[in-house]
Image (cartoon, coloured by chain):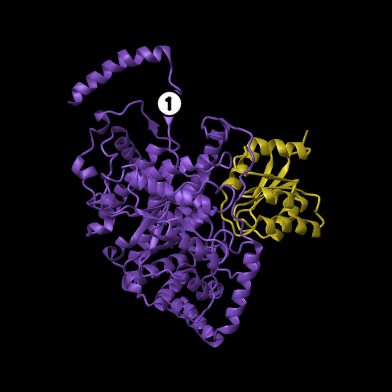
Amino acid sequence: MSKSIRVELDRWQKTALNKVLSKAPERESSFKTASEIEIKRLYTPLDLEDVEYCGDLGFPGEYPFTRGAQPTMYRGRFWTMRQYAGFATAEETNKRYKYLLDHGQTGLSVAFDLPTQIGYDSDHPLAEGEVGKSGVAIDTLKDMEILFDGIPLDKVSTSMTITSPAAIIFAMYIAVAEKQGAKAEVLQGTIQNDILKEYAARGTYIFPPLESMRITTDIFAFCKEHVPRWNSISVSGYHMREAGSSAVQEVAFTLANGIAYVEAAIRAGLDVDSFASRLSFFFNAHNNFLEEIAKFRAARRLWAKIMRERFKAKKDESCIMRFHTQTAGSALTYQQPDNNVVRVAFQALAAVLGGTQSLHTNSRDEAFALPSEDSVHIALRTQQIIAYESGVADTIDPMAGSYAIEAMTNDIEKKAMEYITRIDEMGGAVMAIGAGFIQREIADSAYQYQKEIESKKRVIVGVNKFQEDEEPLKDILRVQIESEILQKEKLSKIKKERESQKVQAALAALKKVAGGTGNLVFPILDAVRVYATVGEISDTLREVFGEHKET
Amino acid sequence: MSRKIRVLIAKPGLDGHDRGAKVVARALRDAGMEVIYTGIRQTPEQIANTAIQEGVDIIGLSCLSGAHNTLFPKVVEMLKQKGAGDIHIFGGGIIPVEDIPVLKKAGIREIFQPGTSTEDIIKYIHTHIIS
């Protein structure tokens, strides 16, 4: 068959194609994605000659999971609709969660403010102006009690974007659940707990890499024993993509970080099959629709191979990449913001066609501020329209077998693996980040992307083409300075009311464990239960571990 | 022969979104300016000190965390306290339009919104700083 296709393709090129090309050249001399993947004019079965169906694609829920993480996919149940939200105080954010759940959202996702993410209390001098701005402010267990008030934690699954203080916030979550009468073993959700991408792109690190990795693996060990349904990490490519990486780099750097965590856990004495099924991932859904679909499929297949071939995982579950997706914040435009609704819809569709397990759709007004309730409403409805109206959820992995998609899936996997090999040669992701390699690669891609926009080689509708005079968007969400004042008052009240001797004792016990080799999660749980603050616990660890400084 | 314009690109506060700051720093460098980039998580005082030590002509502040109303005016204040209140400051990030007059009154001379081309920033600097 290939022979006749080759002959026919050749004939077509010499006749029909050349006839048109000789009169009307194509829009570009060559078409490339931002990952430098050459997009061919036409893909045919010839591009898939090396693909062996059972080995390379297989079946959903079976190795190598190219066609999906689970055998029924969205025919069984839709992806979890999980909007990332958090602002001002726990009281305000609790209202937003209830609004989202009332409107059909199926999981929670907590955004914490920057002081919380960097282990500073709301009354710390460096927190000034930042309290409650990019997420909700959490100082003590009291705030977490308010945040989840009236939300049964044994019923809902919760994702928490928290890394450096992941153990602290996770401990608070467990403590709140216990107060609600829910046992730790039934809790479902995810903590981000991915420190490597903080050094590489996101910036909310506290401790040096080695100490941070210890906290990460302590959480793995703790979850394995006590919170078995919890995803103990979300290895995140999202932020590296937002910082400017290409799709290939996103896959490569995320999986390289994933490899580093697996190696660290094995070094800490864990058996690969005891924790691997609780690793989860987090990707971006960007503008190039076909490349993004191929990216998700390639990432899933490549991770499966890494787990099986490199780490000798015996269980199939250990080889499954399950992931959350968020549409690309950096692709949202300030100009003509309503166009963002359309961008988000395409990006979300790519994530669904790529087989995501959960999804956040961005709001149209996020180039202005945190999203308003109206904008969040459209964003959630976008997911529901894809799920209930578009029909794409009724058959599994519908893009499979497309010559273009399968060829691009192969291209992305191959190019990502080339990067991973380079990172291996540098001694792994920790070393590559330490040497600034990953940061430089991301910055180079970001600069290239910007230059392409400015030269109009890359068109962004409403920004460098089809511009118009317009009034900036009104009715945006404002987090008032009163939230910061209120939060500081709450903190000072708690500090007066709690039993300070118990707090001091808990912090002293934590310090002792930190200086030794015990699992940090246990003394942190004891400390949060007596209302020690995020800042106090972080400072105790800072004293022992020191702090990381950007190089 | 004209001397090179010296620019400080700075990230005040806890915000880690440094894509824009890095892109602008590199574009200004490619446009022939001397650019110092502070890196993330700088206090207003650290920024003022760096600006003075490096003898810069102009400072660009970037903030996407929503803390601009607190942090940008503090940089101005710190520079004034240290006798360098004449250094020109502009800013960018996720900054609601209604905050712009407040920031300008506090001494931030211009705010660039998302989607601004680096060409526009280069032109702006050449208009305000004589090399």
B128 displayed left or right of A191: right
Chain A colour?
purple
Task: Please determine whether, in this image, residue A404 is positioned above or below residue A70.
Answer: above
Instruction: Please count the marks in the image.
Output: 1
The residue located at (45%, 37%) in the rendering is A34
- In percent of width and height, residue A350 lies at 38, 42
Depth check, front residue: B53 or A407:
A407
Return the chain for callout 1. Answer: A
Label 1 SS: loop
Type of residue at label 1?
Ser
Depth check, front residue: A547 or A532:
A532
Label 1: few (<14), some or many (≥20) within 10 Å?
few
Q: Which residue does the numbered mark 1 point to in the structure image?
A: A30
- In percent of width and height, residue A243 lies at 51, 48
- Residue B47 picture quarter: bottom right
Chain B colour?
yellow
If the image is split into quadrants, where does the C terminus of chain B sit? Answer: top right
> Residue lying farthest front?
A102
- Residue A480 picture quarter: bottom right
Task: Please determine whether, in this image, residue A97 is positioned above or below residue A467.
Answer: below
Task: Please determine whether, in this image, residue A337 is positioned above or below residue A95.
Answer: above
Asked whether residue A437 is in view, the answer is: no
If the image is split into quadrants, where does the N terminus of chain B sit? Answer: top right
- In percent of width and height, residue B13 lies at 63, 59
Depth check, front residue: A75 or A445:
A75
A357 displayed left or right of B101: left
Asked whether residue B121 is in view, the answer is: yes
- In percent of width and height, residue A271 lies at 28, 66
